[in-house]
């Protein structure tokens, strides 16, 4: 049988060659040159094109190339009765923790302000920001790594999750009833939340009514978690000091989007954590072999939870 790499936004040579080496007897087909889709039982997908699934008559497993799988689960054409798996990569958590720490430090050191002065050729000093309280929204494997990294750098960390987490080494809150309490004194609010029915637009007008006017929002989870119009309104009303955004409702961000020109928003193009194709290869190979042997799949997604 065959594996198809249905990935539309990056070079796949590393992943392709790795799979050919470890599975020499398996036909590996790469988008857009998938010539025999009827032989495919296993697909590795990321940002698949619309109406991608109809040709795969024997499909049994879809593996997300990343830790997130909302791009699959939100696809209206996703086949029924197909197992969904995702990548669990410690390297992704480390990258995201570095990004968040770097973002907070550049805000505290006022690099954003100094860069604007540089464009104007102005020599001017600013006092550093003193806030050290951080609330991390979403404290699964990635969010917990972010929180622990910040703790190790002398930040005061709280965590919030949908359900109670009792094994974390920092104070935690859970459920919608405790969300306002979790963020009300935070100098930095970091979202690593996945996109689910429960998190869609969770950071909205009601949310921003509880944020401190000096607080910065850093979103490295999913763009759909933030109501973008409500964020713009919160910045206008000075309910927030600013935002660092790596993810957006629609990507790539449209050229006319107001975020581009906003002086209180820092944008990066969804690069806070990028899957290393060499690092995830073994998980894909293991799941393909488990499928063929009738063994349980690893990193299986709970479709009801969305992760």
Image (tube, rainbow, N blue to C red):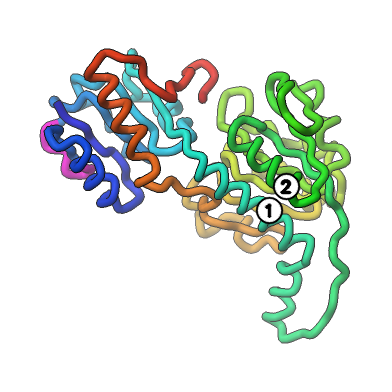
Q: How many numbered discs sit on the rendered protein?
A: 2
Which residue lies under the disc numbered 1?
101
Which residue lies under the disc numbered 2?
150
Give the image quarter of residue 281: top left
* Magenta segment, prevailing SS (helix, strand or loop): loop
Which percent across, then down, holds residue 221?
Answer: 59, 40
Q: Is residue 244 left or right of residue 236?
A: left
Of 128 and 180, the residue lying toward us: 128
Which percent across, then down, holds residue 285?
Answer: 29, 32
Q: Residue at x 23, y 43 (%)?
A: 31
Decide: is 179 above or below 136.
Answer: above
Q: Which secondary structure, mark 2?
A: helix
Of 59 and 76, the residue lying toward us: 59
Decide: is 37 above or below 189.
Answer: above
Find out whether the residues at labels 1 and 2 contact each other: C-beta distance under 8 Å: yes
Q: Earlier in the sequence, mark 1 or mark 2?
A: 1
Residue 34 among magenta residues:
yes
Q: Is residue 107 left or right of residue 67?
A: right
Q: Is residue 291 left or right of residue 38?
A: right
Give the image quarter of residue 38: top left
Which percent across, then down, holds residue 143?
Answer: 64, 37
* The N terminus - image quarter: top left
Q: Residue at x 22, y 24 (%)?
A: 41
Q: Which secondary structure, mark 1?
A: helix
Numbered tag placed on residue 77 in the rendering: none
Bounds of the magenta segment: 30-36
Give the image quarter of residue 119: bottom right
């Amino acid at each position: 049988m065959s594996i198809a790499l249905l990935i539309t936004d990056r070079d796949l040579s590393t992943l392709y060659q790795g799979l050919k080496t470890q599975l020499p007897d398996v036909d590996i087909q790469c988008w857009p040159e998938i010539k025999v889709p009827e032989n495919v039982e296993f697909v590795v997908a990321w940002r698949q094109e619309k109406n991608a699934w109809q040709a795969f008559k024997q499909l049994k497993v879809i593996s997300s190339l990343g830790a997130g799988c909302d791009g699959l689960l939100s696809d209206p054409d996703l086949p029924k009765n197909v197992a969904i798996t995702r990548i669990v990569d410690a390297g992704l958590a480390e990258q995201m923790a570095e990004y968040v720490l770097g973002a907070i430090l550049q805000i505290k050191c006022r690099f954003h302000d100094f860069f604007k002065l540089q464009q104007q050729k102005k020599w001017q000093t600013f006092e550093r920001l003193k806030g050290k309280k951080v609330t991390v929204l979403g404290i699964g494997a990635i969010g917990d790594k972010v929180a622990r990294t910040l703790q190790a750098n002398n930040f005061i960390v709280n965590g919030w999750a949908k359900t109670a987490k009792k094994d974390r080494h920092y104070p935690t809150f859970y459920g919608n009833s405790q969300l306002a309490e979790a963020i009300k004194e935070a100098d930095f609010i970091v979202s690593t939340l996945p996109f689910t029915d429960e998190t869609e637009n969770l950071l909205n007008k009601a949310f921003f009514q509880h944020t401190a006017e000096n607080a910065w929002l850093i979103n490295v989870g999913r763009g759909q978690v933030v109501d973008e119009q409500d964020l713009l309104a919160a910045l206008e009303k000075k309910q927030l000091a600013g935002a660092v955004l790596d993810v957006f409702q629609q990507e790539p961000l449209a050229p006319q989007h107001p975020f581009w020109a906003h002086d209180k928003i820092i944008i990066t193009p969804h690069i806070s954590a990028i899957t290393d194709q060499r690092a995830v290869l073994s998980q894909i190979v293991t799941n393909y072999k488990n499928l063929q042997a009738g063994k349980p799949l690893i990193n299986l997604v709970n479709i009801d939870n969305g992760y």
